[in-house]
Image (cartoon, grey):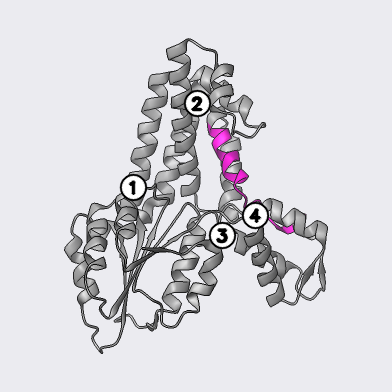
Amino acid sequence: MAEVKSHEFDGFLKRKPLPVRLFLVYGPDRGLVSERAAALAAVSGVDLNDAFSVVKLDAGEVGSQPGRLIDEMNAIGLFGGDRLVWVRNAGSEKGLSDALEILSKMPAGPSTLIIEAGDLKKGAGLRKAAESGSAVVAIPCYADDGRALQALIDQELAAEGLRISPAARSRLVETIGGDRLASRNEVRKLALYCRGRELIEEQDVEEIVGDASAISTDDAVDAILKGDKDGFLHAIQKIVSSKTPVFLVLQGCLRQFQLLELMRAEMDEKRAPAAQAMATLGRHLHFRRKPIVENALKTWTGPAIRRETQRLQAAILQSRQRPALEDTIAMQTMLATVLQSARR
């Protein structure tokens, strides 16, 4: 398997033709996953407006039947020519990983396969299938670093003939970066706001750009831990307005409760105070968040944390199985967790 790193992706797209027809695009930055999958589709040679040449599937439709995807890849278009099979919302579906493993061992056919997946841990079935196949290219998508954010800003503002002051650029970088799609939308919104001018100032950024950084999801998770329903709804409103997927908050909430479970287990095993568990397992937390997490450790019992973790995991599974209801499932689950925190 070839892995295309972030700084290599633009150069990879320029290769004509692309060296393989099987692509796995995955990572925690769902906006970047979507953007790169769309870029691959654009250079696949398939007419994306031809409904007979493009097949879009949800990973849940493949389910436990690898034959479904293999049949689609081997099908011949109604009018001939290349075809594109585009699978979204992939995760731990065994049928999908089995199909990718089989396809990677078959001779290349007339179809291109693009799979969009979430954050796959090393050893996950789908990622393992890609890593073991020489005919598959994997493209991991992680949150943009400083260099990538600067390039994104320059690209979008240059298209509008705009320049940005150093102070405004610094302020803009602080408020974007959690999700590529959300970051791009915020920069485009800023460019539209300043259209007709030559220079963007810091005040323009403060007036028009919402918080599309990773800390915006932390605000929602912290409100959940505090049992602050109004604060949670306010944070979610900011997240939605910045085009950041609500699913990311649900994922962040699950990660926080998994960490709470580890900390609480250490407290119970060693009969240690919350501050000691924080010192050993919570050193990476932002200093502003530490008092909130420590207080949650004092109010949540071990069994209660485990029950909540299981409920959050079940909600994530349901949202993968029913993508049309993803936002509804996420909101209902997190609101229930807020209320649980408030009772404590």
Q: Nearer the viewer, mark 3 or mark 1?
A: 1
Q: List the residue tagged with mark 2.
A: 341
Tell me: residue 322, above or below residue 196: above
* Residue at position x 61%, y 36% in the image: 231
Query: Which SS class for mark 1?
Result: loop
Q: CA distance from mark 4 to mark 2?
A: 29 Å
Query: Which SS class for mark 3?
Result: helix
Q: List the residue tagged with mark 4.
A: 176
Q: List the residue tagged with mark 3.
A: 180
- As drawn, is 64 to the left or to the right of 31? left
Mark 1 vs 4, N-terminal side: 1
Q: Hey, what amino acid is under mark 4?
A: Ile
Classed neighbour count for the residue bearing mark 1: other residues with Cα under 10 Å, few (<14), some (14–19), many (≥20): few
**Stretch in magenta:** 206-224
Q: CA distance from mark 2 to mark 1?
A: 34 Å
- Residue 213: within the magenta? yes
Mark 2 vs 1, N-terminal side: 1
Question: Cβ–Cβ below 8 Å for labels 3 and 1?
Answer: no
Q: Nearer the viewer, residue 35 or 270?
A: 270
